[in-house]
Image (cartoon, rainbow, N blue to C red):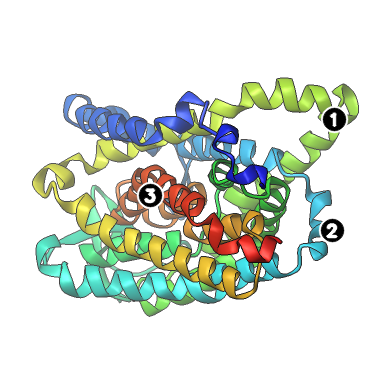
Amino acid sequence: MNDEANPANERKLTNLFERYLTLWVGLCIVGGILLGRVAPRVAKYLDSLSIAVKGAPVVSIPIAVCLFFMMYPIMVKIDFASVIKAGKSGRPVWLTLFVNWAIKPFTMYGIALLFLGVLFRGLIGADATDLVKMPLGLDLAVGDAHGAGTVVLSDGVKMLQVPLWRSYLAGCILLGIAPCTAMVLVWGYLARGNDGLTLVMVAINSLTMLVLYGLLGGFLLGIGRLPVPWQALLLSIGIYVALPLVAGYFSRKWIIQSKGETWFKEKFLHVLTPVTIIALLTTLVLLFSFKGETILGNPLTILWIAIPLFLQTMLIFWLGYWWAKLLKLPYRDAAPAAMIGASNHFEVAIATATMLFGLSSGAALATVVGVLIEVPVMLWLVKICLRTQHWFEQARA
């Protein structure tokens, strides 16, 4: 009897933040809406503390700090030396890369376009509009058209007025090209998957994002008539992926050399664990302080966004899981390989949406809905994996 099938070895979430993440996100929605109603100037003031280019705010300093601390704890956990050994894993690594980058971005675009742009368009508001940031470096006059939007003046700042559903579509696109968050380490652990392989694939995805995130993002946003300049995507990747990745790599190396690997894993990472969630929740409070009016005016907004995100998650999981079975992968490799594609790197998606379109944009709200459904949906997929281990018994033999 394989110990993976033994209920006595059942793994459970022990981290309070991870276990109740959906609850914390729900509380942030309420807290953010209340903040926007009671003290609307607070969040606006914080977001006004920004780095500007040609008079237009580009990077909000408080949000950039929060988002850095969302990403750094993820990156510092990764031992990039293990990427060299990934060749031994072979098929599960290539399966994950194929699903994540050749399938997932395009199915996300198609599903989101169908639901948000066709089926739910009237429910969202066929004529509803959203104000998003002007693309970095773009100097257009008020009234000029850009993609699906028109340049308008809002509080003395040039903004792009776009259809609201297209703004939500942009957020879904950014989620679709952001596979695999550090949370997948939790999902793989709970499913009794191969923890070492999961960590290697997280590292490989992080490196792959440096190249493909900007390319696919620019391409799909352009098709969605929300074009953004390449330099804006590159800047976003540089700030929210490359910077914490480099900081994580060198600080990990220095700490292990100075204190030893045992101290790093048992002391440093233990203190660092809640930092990502705290930074995430702080960002969400600010975001919902801006989107309170939209949510209160149309309380089903989150549902309309959640439906295509849910369907996309299920589609990608089952594609990866069935292909793993066809490739005769052992269960310990099949479960994390399927869940890495299904899970989203919502930290990067939120960061990029905030930077490209603004904290108050519908795109940023759509990425947060991804956080809201992540925990319950992924826990459901963990249960599916555990109940279908027997599908892979012949491959393990």
Counting from the top left corner in percent of width and height, residue 300 is at: 14, 51
Asked if 393 appears above or below 379 in the picture, the reply is: below
Q: Residues within 10 Å of mark 3 (few under 14, many from 20)?
A: some
Residue 281 in which image quadrant: top left
Please report whichever mark, 2 or 1, sits nearer to the chain's N-terminal start: 2
Counting from the top left corner in percent of width and height, residue 3 is at: 66, 42
Residue type, numbered disc 1: Ile
Q: Secondary structure at mark 2?
A: helix
Number of on-image labels: 3
Counting from the top left corner in percent of width and height, residue 295 is at: 17, 45
Q: Is residue 63 left or right of residue 366?
A: right
* Residue that carries the numbered disc 1 in the rendered image: 256
Residue type, numbered disc 3: Val
At horizontal 39% and vertical 48% (from top left) the residue drawn is 380
Please report whichever mark, 3 or 2, sits nearer to the chain's N-terminal start: 2
The reply to whether dot 1 and dot 3 touch (C-beta < 8 Å) is: no
* Residue that carries the numbered disc 3 in the rendered image: 377
Please report whichever mark, 1 or 3, sits nearer to the chain's N-terminal start: 1
* Residue ranking furthest to the right: 257
Q: Nearer the viewer, residue 238 or 97?
A: 97
At horizontal 62% and vertical 26% (from top left) the residue drawn is 272
At horizontal 71% and vertical 61% (from top left) the residue drawn is 397
* Residue that carries the numbered disc 2 in the rendered image: 84
Q: Nearer the viewer, residue 295 or 357?
A: 295
Q: Secondary structure at mark 1?
A: helix
Asked if 65 appears above or below 160 in the picture, the reply is: above
Residue type, numbered disc 2: Ile
Q: Nearer the viewer, residue 72 or 358?
A: 72
Calculate the distance from the C-alpha at mark 1 to the C-alpha at mark 3. 36 Å
Counting from the top left corner in percent of width and height, residue 237 is at: 59, 56
Residue 384 got which mark?
none
